[in-house]
Amino acid sequence: VELATRVGVGADREFLTHLWLRVGALYNRSAYPEPKASGDLSREDFYGVTGGVAWQKDRTQTALGGFYLYSSPDFLVEGSEELRKSDARKVLYGALLTVSYRL
């Protein structure tokens, strides 16, 4: 097991009164080393971006955002003629809606 570096950055900017734009990016490194032999654990690093807008009316704040995550996992394909790395890719995306009431 190795150190798992994780980095996240974000920005929040009010560009009109009570209207904000939010963006971010992330990197999540796997704690496992690159597989070299059959039976080694897989390694998976994630990269992602986020974005959204938020607005406030009186004491209610509403936000709508989205995210996109990408990973190219390293694992060895067993049962093939010669041991090789997989060409698999993972993508995860979605949207979130939040409503909060400020006391």
Image (cartoon, helix red, strand yellow):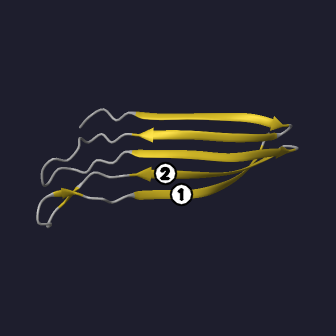
> How many numbered circles does the render carry?
2
- Left or right of residue 86, residue 39 in this image: left
Q: How far from the left and from the top, in percent, is residue 38? A: 12, 54
- Left or right of residue 59, residue 4 in this image: left
| For marks 1 and 2 on the same chain, the one whose residue lies earlier in the sequence | 2
Question: For the residue marked with disc 2, what is the amino acid?
Answer: Leu
Categorize mark 2 by other alpha carbons within 10 Å: few (<14), some (14-19), many (20+).
some
- Screen quadrant of the N terminus: top left
Instruction: Give the label on residue 69, or none.
Output: 2
Q: Secondary structure at mark 1?
A: strand
Residue shown at the point (57%, 51%) measured from the top left: 67
Residue shown at the point (60%, 35%) measured from the top left: 10
Q: State which quadrant residue 17 falls in.
A: top right
Q: How far from the left and from the top, in percent, is residue 39? A: 14, 54
Q: Secondary structure at mark 2?
A: strand
Q: Are marks 1 and 2 in contact (CB under 8 Å)?
A: yes
Q: State which quadrant residue 83 falls in.
A: bottom left
Q: Mark 1 to mark 2: distance in Å? A: 6 Å
Which residue lies under the disc numbered 1? 93
Instruction: Give the label on residue 81, or none.
Output: none
Q: How far from the left and from the top, in percent, is residue 88? A: 33, 60
Question: For the residue marked with disc 1, what is the amino acid?
Answer: Tyr
Tell me if residue 73 comes above or below residue 17 in the rendering.
below
